[in-house]
Image (cartoon, rainbow, N blue to C red):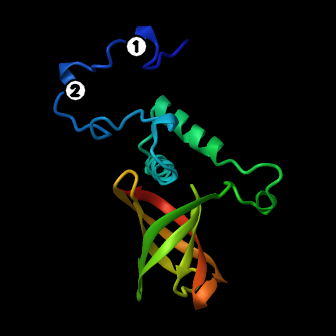
Amino acid sequence: LRSTGPASPSAGSGDPGPSFEGLPGRHPTGSAGTGLAQTSSMIDLVYRYRVLLDACAAGDGLTIDEIDELNQVEARFAAGADDLRAREGRRFRREPVTLSAVLRGGALHDAVTVSELAPGGLVCRRAPYAAVGTLLDVVVDDPVARRSYRFKGRVQWVGDDTGGDHRLGVALLGGAVM
């Protein structure tokens, strides 16, 4: 048996017909099938990855196109054989970025800079001290796309930064909100 996807000529117009009218769509108009090539920034890739991962965890399932998109993002961030951290169990390579963000949680409500980004986590610089295990909201601004992204995270490690500030390694948890 051969399944047909949206790129297949036998798949039809993509219109499910009148019996499906009035059902809420899974994606807002224009967001389905965005693909890796059309994303505007690294943060958008991580956002899409977290949303798709959350849909899997919730038992919603993914379309073939979404599975392909998830695989493309994972391949894009795959840690290479020469990555020492991959030998220690890190799944994704961190990409250097410079994004403004706000950390919120407990007594924290501070502006920071996201300096490294991966689908599984991020590194914040110029951050206040936060104990390992602290749960946070990380709100990241993407000036190129003119959007803000909100992630849940947990502090995994704390290091010293310049000027008495700290660097925080934050593992991302669950989905994301735009």
Residue situated in front as seen by the camera: 156 or 178: 178
Tell me what residue is drawn at x 18 percent, y 28 percent. 21
Residue 101 — which label? none
Residue 128 is situated, as x and y percent measured from the top left of the image, at: 52, 86
Q: Judge whether residue 6 can be spotted in this image.
A: yes
Residue 13 is situated, as x and y percent measured from the top left of the image, at: 32, 14
Tell me what residue is drawn at x 48 percent, y 64 percent. 99
Q: Is residue 71 above or below residue 114?
A: above
Residue 170 is situated, as x and y percent measured from the top left of the image, at: 57, 71
Residue type for callout 1: Ala
Residue type for callout 2: Phe
Q: Is residue 62 above or below residue 124?
A: above
Residue situated in front as seen by the camera: 144 or 59: 144
Q: Secondary structure at mark 1?
A: helix
Q: Give the side of residue 81 with respect to residue 68, left or right.
A: right
Q: Is residue 107 above or below residue 146?
A: below
Residue 20 — which label? 2
Q: Are marks 1 and 2 in contact (CB under 8 Å)?
A: no
Tell me what residue is drawn at x 75 percent, y 60 percent. 89
- Quadrant (top left, top right, bottom left, bottom right) of the C terminus: bottom left
Q: Nearer the viewer, mark 1 or mark 2?
A: 1
How far, Cα to Cα, is label 1 from label 2?
Answer: 17 Å
Residue 91 is situated, as x and y percent measured from the top left of the image, at: 69, 55
Q: Can you identify the residue that label 1 sits on? A: 11
